[in-house]
Structure formats: C-alpha cells, structure tokens
Image (cartoon, grey):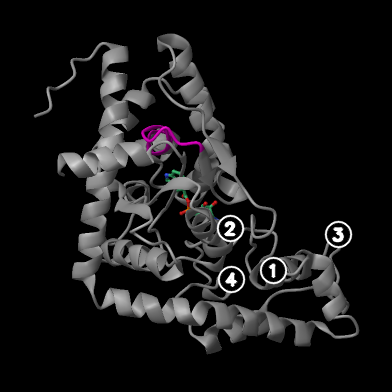
Amino acid sequence: MSELSQNNEVKKEKKKISLSFIQPSGSITLGNYLGALTNWVTIQNSGDFNCLYAMADLHALTVRHEPADLRKQIYQGLATLLACGIDPEKSIVFLQSHVHQHAELGWILDCYTMFGELSRMTQFKDKSAKNADNINAGLFTYPALMAADILLYQTDFVPVGQDQKQHVEIARDIANRFNGIYGKTFNLPEPYITKSGARIMSLADPTKKMSKSDSNVNAIITVTDTDNEIIKKFKRAVTDSGSEVRMGEGKDGVNNLINIYSAVTGKSTEEVEREFEGKGYGDFKLACGEVVADRIRPIREKINDYMNNRDYLDQISAVGAERASIFAQRTLDKVYKKVGLVVKKHN
Ligand code: TYM
C-alpha cells in the first residue's frame, strides 16, 4: 500500500470504530439480517463511523463441515454483505482468515482468558451439547479469538444480536484484565443492540432463536429462499390456539411474527396490532410472508449476481484484508511490546 493511502487510513481513524463479523456456517438468515446486518448498513451509511465487517471463517472451523460447502458459504456470505448494502468503498470488508493478526492475537489472549469464564459461556454450553462428539479446544476458546477480532481494531461499537452480548462482554473483561496488567492497550468495546430484530425466533419452535445451523428448513428464512418458500414457511409458522394478533405472554409464535413484521416495515408493535385488528392469524401470516419476500427478493437477486463474479469478491476481500491489517498490525505490535515479545522490524 502506498504511503499516501496509508496516511489516508490514519486520517480516517479519528472517527469511532464499528466492527462486526458473521460466521459462514450456513446460509444467512432473517435473524442475522434483522438482528445484525441492517444495523451494520445503517451505521455505515450514517458516515459517523469507520466500519469493519467480516466473515468469521476461522470461527466456522469449530464445527465439522464439508470443505467445499464452507468455501461456498464464505463467498455467499461476502456476496450477502454486499447485497444487503455493505459498500466496500465505505467499509472495510474482509475475511478473518486473510488477516493473520487475528489468530496471533487470539493465541495471546488465550493466555489472559480464564478456564472458568470460558466454561460459563452460553454458546459453548449450547454448541457442546449439540456436538457432543466434537467438543474441541477451538469451540472452548472461541471467545478469545472473537475478543481478538474486536480488540485488534480498538473497536468502540459492536453491532450484534442479543445472543452475542455475552461474547462482547467477555471481550471487554479480557481487555480490562490486560489493560490492568500492562496499562491501557485496548479500547473497551460496547455491544450495540437495537430493540427490534435483536432476537428473531425459529418459525417452527418460537422458544428457540432462529439459527443458520437449524436442520429444519421450515424453522428458518434464509436470504436465498424464493418468494414461494418464504410465503409457505410463514403460512406454516407455529402460533397458538388463539386468534387475535396481539403481543402477549405464552404467545411466543405471534410475538415473533409481530416483531418480524415490525422490524421489516419499521412500524411499532402497537401499529402492527392495530393494522391487524379483527383479522386472524391466517391473514397475518400471509402479510408477514409478503413483506419479508419483498425485502429478501432484491437481496437474493444481487447475491446471485455477485456469486457469478467470484473474481470481484476475491478482489474486494483482498483489498479489505490489506486495509484491515494496517490497523491490526499496529495493535499487535503494541501487544508484543507490552508482553515482552520482540517486535519484528517491518520494512
Ligand atoms: P453469528 O454468525 O451466529 O451471527 C451473526 C450476527 O447475527 C446475529 N443473530 C441474530 N440476531 C437476531 N436474531 C437471531 N435469531 C440471530 N441469530 C444471529 C448475531 O447476534 C450476530 O450479530 N460469534 C459471532 C461471529 C463473530 C463476531 C466477531 C461478531 C466472530 N467474531 C466479532 C462480532 C464481533 C457469531 O457466531 O455470529
């Protein structure tokens, strides 16, 4: 990278930093879209932040996968970010594995992360219950690598869904511990979670969150689903024996659909209740399917276009990785110095 563009990177640094990643462990869902990606785009377009958004491909190795599927999902994830409105001219977009500093800081932070705190992580408990035959060390130390993702860039805000709050908090705890020992090294990040869309539930079991890795295709809406598939899945969505479109206790299915409708249309939940007064669940489910299909359609079409142009995706991620590694290396050098390692002389 030329000296001039390095200087430009430094100048841009003054703004607050927003960073978030997504795992390529399956097709991106409506939950990921409403809980995270829409906020990534809003933050990017506000112009008030320097944004870094990436595919957490190293994290995806913690569960068994087919190599060819993973590679396709990495490309598809990248295509989805762009299709949803992440603009590589405005944000730094990259693959985690292309910025080697993540794995390096991840190892160092492993040494400042306690067995007890890792054992308490909800995601570790859930995933080890689901993958009882593969409770590997990476699954256990996952939060330290995620902390490295965040802390390498002196991140201020991490836009995530509710389920990732605990991971951002442990990143903060690790940063605090490290700063306490060596003096201020890392900025303390904060999760950025919006009310609507923060926790989108499964359509088949609305007591569980909608998850990419769900084996029941009817439980999840993905950004590659067709209009018909989306409408069918909403028609089948599990509700309850009532009939009124109202939020309420014990009405997890309807609550979830109201949340989805509200997040997609921008209407408040009260407005949604008023709009469907006197109408039954059938009408409401169809309306949900239609608004979601309308929202997903242009995204799906753009994903297809990008997937037919992998050279472009390679080019975007290479430029993004080069830009990201300037910031990452600066933090890593600082950490090397603090802990007593010898900083490699850069040319
Ligand atoms: P991942 O890939 O599981 O999810 C990506 C983002 O989508 C949000 N999300 C949801 N939001 C609302 N409702 C849902 N049902 C739902 N499901 C997922 C997640 O909260 C997340 O914001 N560990 C992370 C990836 C990661 C990361 C990072 C995130 C790695 N390094 C650094 C932020 C910063 C994960 O597995 O997200």
- The answer to whether residue 142 is above or below residue 249 is above
Q: Quadrant of residue 308?
A: bottom left
Q: Earlier in the sequence, mark 3 or mark 1?
A: 3
Considering the image in quadrants, where does the N terminus appear? top left
Q: CA distance from mark 3 to mark 2?
A: 22 Å
Asked if labels 4 and 3 touch by Cβ distance under 8 angstroms, the answer is no
Considering the image in quadrants, where does the C terminus appear? top left
Residue under the image location 12 percent in, 22 percent down: 345
The response on whether ligand 1 sits within 8 Å of label 2 is yes
Q: Earlier in the sequence, mark 2 or mark 1?
A: 2
Judged from the image, the secondary structure of the residue bearing numbered disc 3 is loop
Q: CA distance from mark 1 to mark 4?
A: 23 Å
Q: CA distance from mark 3 to mark 4?
A: 21 Å
Q: Earlier in the sequence, mark 3 or mark 4?
A: 4
Q: Residue 216 vs residue 271: left or right?
A: left
The location of residue 87, given as percent across then percent down, is: 38, 62
Which of the two discs, 1 and 4, sits closer to the camera? 1
Q: Which residue is mark 2?
A: 35
Q: Which mark is residue 219?
A: 4
Residue type, numbered disc 2: Gly
